[in-house]
């Protein structure tokens, strides 16, 4: 997404010109047997989480929170932050915090959406779990039938493991459950198959396999989660799975010093594609997956993550740049 917001120039010096919003889309990919087999294998791939900010003093307390351009819910959404992510407060104004995330993005959040860290990070190394399901329920006890979930968390959310060796014995099937401490201090339970303690980065092939898992997830302006991505939020998330923290907006991604230019004839799977009226007016982005196809989140035709052919209209005329991570 290309947002009208305050950017941290020291992090992304390319953010000088007033950015433009992205609106685009594509046709749905019609899959065959091999694609269905791929989807069965993809859930084994773990997620990378949004990184905490050095010196963070707040932690996101809700599944997904909106980051606004100004301290008002009537202003536009510039990005989002996910549950369990440590963020840095820049300023407080009434019931609002101006925060910064690890990618250098800044925006305003409602104060009720975050908790103070009091000098102690949430889900620190050795205690952190990451949600690897597209959505995961957290329950008040290790049982899915007794009560409604406490929280429904998206992919990449962070949870803190609850380590208590003196706890009373758990039910016989407790091996499928992990006890966690929520941001607000409550204890919860999550099913083991929904989370992982691994933070290992993926290679390009695994990242591309993972990308197919998000097909059909809706487009949401400013979105960075499996509850709804925007185009650059989607590609940024994919690169994060490789351990790469890329700028948030499409124009900044194209201008970023972590990429090199690529000619269309030299495209390789994993390359980033940028669309717009010109190279100076980028309005959309996606990722090349090979065989003349790319995956992206768009509002064109129908909103959501989909696969399109680069030679099809309007994409073949709108492609203005391609980049490869160094």
Image (cartoon, rainbow, N blue to C red):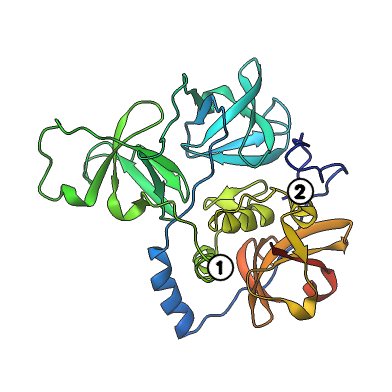
**Which residue shows up at 65% across the image and 83% down it?**
291
**Which residue shows up at 48% across the image and 38% down it?**
83
- As drawn, which residue projects farthest toward the top? 94
Question: Which label sits in the foreground, 2 or 1?
Answer: 1
Q: Is residue 137 left or right of residue 134?
A: left
Image quarter in which the C terminus is found: bottom right
Answer with mark 2 or mark 1, whichever residue precedes in sequence: 2
Q: Which residue is mark 1?
A: 204
Q: Position of residue 308 (x, y in %)?
A: 67, 74
Q: Is residue 22 left or right of residue 242?
A: right
Q: Secondary structure at mark 1?
A: helix
Q: Residues within 10 Å of mark 2 (few under 14, many from 20)?
A: many
Q: Is residue 309 visible?
A: yes
Q: Position of residue 8 (x, y in %)?
A: 74, 35
Name above or below for residue 95 compared with residue 242. above
- As drawn, which residue projects farthest toward the front? 326
**Which residue shows up at 32% across the image and 28% down it?**
186
Determine which quarter of the picture holds residue 318: bottom right
Residue in front for this viewpoint, 36 or 89 = 89
Q: Is residue 218 left or right of residue 298?
A: left
Name above or below for residue 208 compared with residue 239. below
Name above or below for residue 269 compared with residue 280. below
Residues at badges 2 and 1 in contact (C-beta under 8 Å)?
no
What is the CA distance from the residue labelled 2 to the residue labelled 1?
25 Å
Q: Position of residue 61 (x, y in %)?
A: 47, 31
Q: Which residue is mark 2?
A: 2
Q: Secondary structure at mark 2?
A: loop
Q: Residues within 10 Å of mark 1 (few under 14, many from 20)?
A: some
Q: Position of residue 70 (x, y in %)?
A: 73, 28
Q: Is residue 313 visible?
A: no
């Amino acid at each position: 997404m290309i947002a009208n917001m305050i950017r941290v120039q020291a992090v992304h010096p390319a953010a000088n010109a007033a950015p433009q919003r992205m609106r685009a889309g594509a046709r749905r990919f019609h899959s065959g047997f091999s694609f269905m087999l791929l989807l069965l294998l993809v859930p084994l791939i773990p997620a990378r989480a949004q990184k905490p900010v050095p010196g963070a003093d707040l932690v996101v307390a809700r599944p997904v929170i909106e980051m606004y351009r100004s301290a008002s819910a009537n202003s536009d959404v510039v990005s989002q932050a996910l549950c369990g992510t440590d963020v840095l407060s820049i300023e407080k104004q009434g019931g609002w915090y101006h925060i910064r995330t690890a990618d250098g993005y800044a925006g305003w959040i409602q104060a009720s959406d975050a908790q103070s860290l009091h000098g102690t990070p949430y889900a620190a190394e050795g205690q952190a779990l990451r949600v690897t399901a597209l959505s995961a329920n957290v329950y008040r006890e290790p049982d899915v039938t007794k009560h409604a979930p406490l929280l429904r968390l998206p992919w990449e959310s962070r949870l803190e493991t609850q380590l208590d060796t003196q706890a009373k014995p758990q039910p016989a099937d407790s091996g499928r459950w992990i006890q966690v401490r929520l941001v607000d201090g409550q204890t919860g339970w999550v099913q083991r198959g929904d989370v992982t303690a691994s933070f290992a980065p993926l290679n390009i092939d695994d990242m591309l396999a993972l990308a197919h898992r998000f097909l059909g997830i809706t487009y949401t302006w400013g979105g960075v989660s499996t509850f709804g991505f925007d185009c650059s939020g989607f590609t940024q998330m994919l690169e994060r799975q490789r351990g790469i923290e890329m700028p948030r907006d499409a124009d900044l991604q194209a201008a970023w010093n972590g990429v090199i230019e690529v000619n269309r004839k030299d495209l390789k799977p994993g390359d980033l594609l940028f669309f717009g009226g010109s190279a100076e007016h980028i309005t959309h982005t996606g990722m090349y997956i090979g065989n003349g196809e790319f995956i992206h989140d768009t509002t064109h035709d129908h909103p959501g993550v989909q696969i399109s052919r680069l030679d099809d209209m309007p994409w073949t005329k709108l492609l203005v740049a391609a980049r490869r991570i160094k």
